[in-house]
Structure formats: C-alpha cells, structure tokens
Image: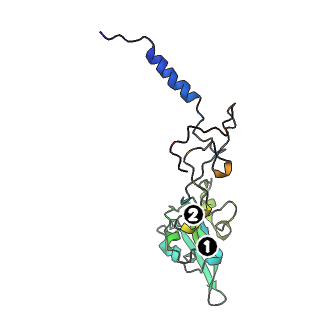
Amino acid sequence: MKSNTFGLGILKGLGVTMKNFMRPPITVQYPEEKLVTSKRIRGNEVLWYAAKCTGCATCAKACPQGNIEIVTSPGPENRRTVEKFEVDTGRCIFCGLCVEACPYDALFLGRAYEKARFRRRELVTGIDSIQFSEERQPSAFARPALESGLPKQTLLVYWDRPRREGGQKLAWLPFKRRGKKPKFPIGRSK
Ligand code: SF4
Ligand code: SF4
C-alpha cells in the first residue's frame, strides 16, 4: 500500500509561491514604465518629410482608405508646392502602403502608439502635425536605413541595463539588484 506524506503538497505549493514572491517583477507599470517598441513598428501616425516631397500624390493613390488629401500649386523650378497634406489617422489602418509607395522616401510611419483622442476630428493631422519632431519619430518600417539609429526592442523589463538601453530601476522594491545578474528576462538576445 502506498503511503502519502501528509502536507507535502501544501509545502510544495508554498515553495513555489515564495520563490515567485522574491523574484523581480517582469510586468511593466504602464504608463510610468514603457517598453521599447520594435524598430519597425507601425505606430499610430504617418509622418512626412516635407523637404523630399514633390507633391506627386502617389501615396494618396496607394491608400486603400482614401485617407490622404494633398493640394499642390505650381512652384519654382518646375516643381509643385504642397499647400495641404492631410492624413485622417482616425480612418487609417496603418497598412503602410502609402509609405511603401512613396518614390522619394518622404513618408514614414511613426513610432508613437498613444494617440487616443476624445474627438475624431482631433485625429486629422495636417502639415504642422505630421512633420518630424522630438515627439514624432519615424519608424524603420519600409525604411531599413533608419534601423541602425533606433533603440533595440525590449520584450521584457531589463532590470540590469541602464535606462537608455531599455533598462528600468527597481524603484519600489526595498532592495537593489544593480550589478547582480537577474534570472529575467528569459531568452535575452545580446
Ligand atoms: S497607412 Fe494605409 S490607410 Fe493609413 S494613410 Fe497610409 S495607405 Fe492609407
Ligand atoms: S508619394 Fe511621397 S513625394 Fe509623392 S506626394 Fe506622397 S509623400 Fe510626397
């Protein structure tokens, strides 16, 4: 007859609980903490590089949503001046076809993903709100030349890395793990 040790299952379960209780968390306290997105993310915005745009409207023709509105006028040296370049990001499906279609590398998808607004009309972006800036950074989607300048994606929180490399600080835990090799993240590629 097989004899079972009384309470062994409970002790095993408690062991697992205690082991995980002492581990650093692998979740992110969003929005205070954020992971670095993929270099080729298709973010919630279309960005435009005015200096390269010829106003050819190839991007507008490629858009399956009819989402890009361009108005041009005759400019100097047989070029077109872009008077209006409007993208309705509320209707955009972020397929990137406009970016791929642009023959002059003047269009990019952005890296931002927090573009929720209360009113739909606030999602219509014009010339002033689709050009590059500190907040509006282009993604390397369909623009591989940008990849080397973008930060590496973080899939989990990297506790042992400096913040500029996607690392985070254990701000709320009572002990520090800096300098100590953590068990997480699993499968880190470096
Ligand atoms: S990403 Fe797609 S849907 Fe959005 S503007 Fe470009 S082509 Fe149109
Ligand atoms: S396809 Fe490129 S160059 Fe032509 S209008 Fe669109 S952004 Fe400008």
**Mark 1 sits on what residue?**
85
Disc on res. 147: 2
Q: Which residue in the rendered view is the most extreme toward the left? A: 1
Give the left or right position of residue 94, taking residue 1 as reference: right
Q: Looking at the rendering, which quadrant does residue 119 occupy?
A: bottom right
Q: In which quadrant will I find the N terminus? A: top left
Q: Secondary structure at mark 2?
A: helix
- Mark 2, other Cα within 10 Å: few <14 / some 14–19 / many ≥20: some
Residue drawn at (57%, 71%), measured in percent from left and top?
A: 107
Mark 1 vs ligand 2: CB below 8 Å: yes
Tag 1: amino acid: Phe
Q: Position of residue 133 (x, y in %)?
A: 69, 64
Residue drawn at (51%, 22%), measured in percent from left and top?
A: 15
Tag 2: amino acid: Glu
Distance, label 2 to label 1, CA atoms, is 26 Å
Q: Nearer the viewer, residue 180 or 60?
A: 180
Q: Report the number of numbered marks.
A: 2
Q: Is residue 88 visible?
A: no
